[in-house]
Image (cartoon, helix red, strand yellow):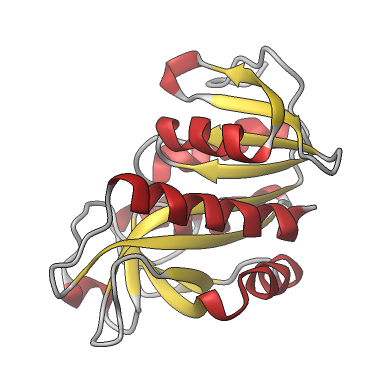
Amino acid sequence: MPARLRPTAAIAPAAILVGDPGRSLLLAQELLEQPKMSNHARGLWGYSGRTPEGEELTIQATGMGGPSAAMVLADLAELGVGRVVRVGTCTAFGPAARAGELLSVGTALAAGGSAASFGVGVGETVAPDATLEQRLAAALGDEARVVTVASLDTMPAERSAAAGAAAADMQTLAVLASARGLGIAAAAVLIAAEDEAGGSLEGEELERAAKRAGRAAVEALI
C-alpha cells in the first residue's frame, strides 16, 4: 500500500498532477465524465474516470513544494501510473512575460537546495520526456512558448536565483527528476499566475487558463 495515497477508486495509467486540491476538482469536472474521488487522504484530492473519448485518466493533487510532489509521484508509480503531465502555476520573468500566458516546460532548472534529494545539483537541469513534451507543445500550439523554468524551495521567486529561466515555480524540477528515477514519462505546462510587472491572474481567468492547460495535457497523455 502506498505511504500517502489511499486509493478508493482505480488509478489510471495516465495522470495529470496539480498542486492545488481545488484545481484537481476543477479539472476533474472539466475533463472527466462521472469522476470518482480516488483519494482524499492527507487532503491530497484525487479523481479518476474516463474522458469523453473513453480513455482512463487520473487527476491528482500533489500539495505544496517539490518534496510533496515527489512523494505523491512515488505513490502513483506504485499504483501503476506510467505517464504524467504537471499542470501548475508559476511566476513569469522578463519584458515579454505576462500573467495568464501558458508555458510549456522544455527544461527545468534546479534553483533550490532540496533538488539534491532528487539527485540534481543546484544549477543543473532536467528535461521532460521528449515524446510527451513534443505532444504537449503540439497540443498547446501558438498558445504557449517552450521555456526553461527554475524550481525553488520557496516562492515568490528572487530573480537572481532563477537566472537564465523564463519563470519559476516550486514543483516542476521535482516532478521531472523523480519521474526519471521512477521510469515515468513526464512533462509540464505552467500558467503564469503573476509576472514581474505586477500582473496577476485570479478567479475565473485562472480557472479558464487551467482548463485550457488541462485539455492540452489530456491530448498529450492520451
Q: Who is closer to the viewer here, 73 or 96?
A: 96
Q: Looking at the image, which is closer to me, 195 or 34?
A: 34
**Number of marks drawn:** 0
* Horizontal side, residue 83 vs residue 39: left or right: right
The percent position of residue 19, horizontal first and vertical second, equals: 42, 41
Identified at 52% across, 79% down, the residue is 146
Asked whether residue 175 appears in the rendered view, the answer is no
Location of residue 79 in the rendering, given as x and y in whole percent from the top left corner: 73, 28
* Residue depicted at x 59% and y 39%: 30
Does residue 183 appear left or right of residue 163 in this picture?
A: right
Q: Position of residue 203 (x, y in %)?
A: 30, 45
Farthest residue toward the front?
204
In the figure, 53 relative to 179: above or below?
above
Q: Which residue is pictured at 72% across the width and 65% down the height? A: 132
Residue 2, above or below 90: above
Question: Residue at 55% of width from left, 60% of height from top?
Answer: 188
> Residue 17's image quarter?
top right
Q: Is residue 44 left or right of residue 130?
A: left
Residue 94 screen position, x and y as percent: 25, 84
- Camera-side residue of 132 and 55: 55
